[in-house]
Image: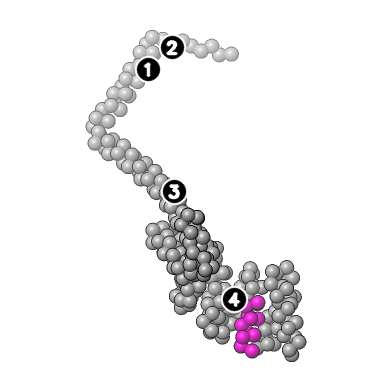
Amino acid sequence: MKIKKKMTRKQLLKQEDEFISTSAKVLNWIKENYNKVVMGLILIVIVMVVVLSVRYRSKTNLVKSNELLYMAKNIYYTPIRPPDQKQDPTKPFQGFASSEEKYQKAIELFNELVELYPNSKAAEDAYFFIPNCLCFLGKYDQAIEGFNGYLDRYPIGLYAEQAQVGIGFVHEAKGDYDKSIAVFQEILENNPDFILRDAVYMQLGRTFEKLGSFDKAKEAYQNVIINYPESPFLEEAEEKFNMLAEKS
């Protein structure tokens, strides 16, 4: 075991002199570079303020955009009052008088969300729900434009598949059955893992029926029966297929 030697007074004084000398040099450097030191500290403070401000703004925008989305979706899903029922001012809101009033109000809120918070997660929902509202309002060309706009912004977004199906539905609603069929067939050909394939086959069957192409309609329904035994459309597909089989 080594015995630690005691420092002599001379060594202690030498250490103290070195500390004082170093401290003096630091103080002199600060005096000589005072403006640089102050500016450096100011820049650090500014950076911290900006970072905290951005974080606060992001959090605030998230809350506000979600609030707007909640309000807009709440209107979107609000039922329509029966024609003979008037709004009772003494009771909670009982629904809109017409679908036009309802979807127009929802569009206003969705558009407000997109304008104020275009880069928010909630904006994606708004871009999808706006063309849905337009479809219910009978504004089919604007609805198709809206669905295509959503797909341009979010090609692999949360509602990408539904937007593609939506375009097919809108063409059908317009009476453009050939375009509707073309959209649905393109979906099936290009998207083997498409989650809504059973719904697409059902829509193809219905559209072929409207065109009087009963064999093709049967083929579409048969696809659901054979390939999607767990589909919620199975019973309807079986009924449609059997009905058309009896006609042929």
What is the quadrant of the C terminus in the image?
bottom right
Q: Quadrant of residue 50?
A: top left
Helix, strand or loop at disc 4?
A: helix
Q: Are marks 2 and 3 in contact (CB under 8 Å)?
A: no
User: Which percent across, then down, holds residue 118?
Assistant: 41, 60
Q: Which residues are magenta?
A: 201-212
Q: Are marks 2 and 1 in contact (CB under 8 Å)?
A: yes
Separation (CA) of disc 3 from disc 4: 38 Å
Callout 1, which amino acid?
Gln
Q: Is residue 203 above or below residue 21?
A: below
Q: Residue at x 69, y 69 (%)?
A: 232
Callout 2, which amino acid?
Met
Magenta span main SS = helix
**Reading the chain from its start, which is encountered first: label 1 or label 3?**
1
**Reading the chain from its start, which is encountered first: label 2 or label 1?**
2
User: Which percent across, then down, holds residue 192?
Assistant: 64, 72
Q: Which residue is mark 3?
A: 59
Q: Is residue 237 visible?
A: yes
Q: Residue at x 53, y 70 (%)?
A: 163
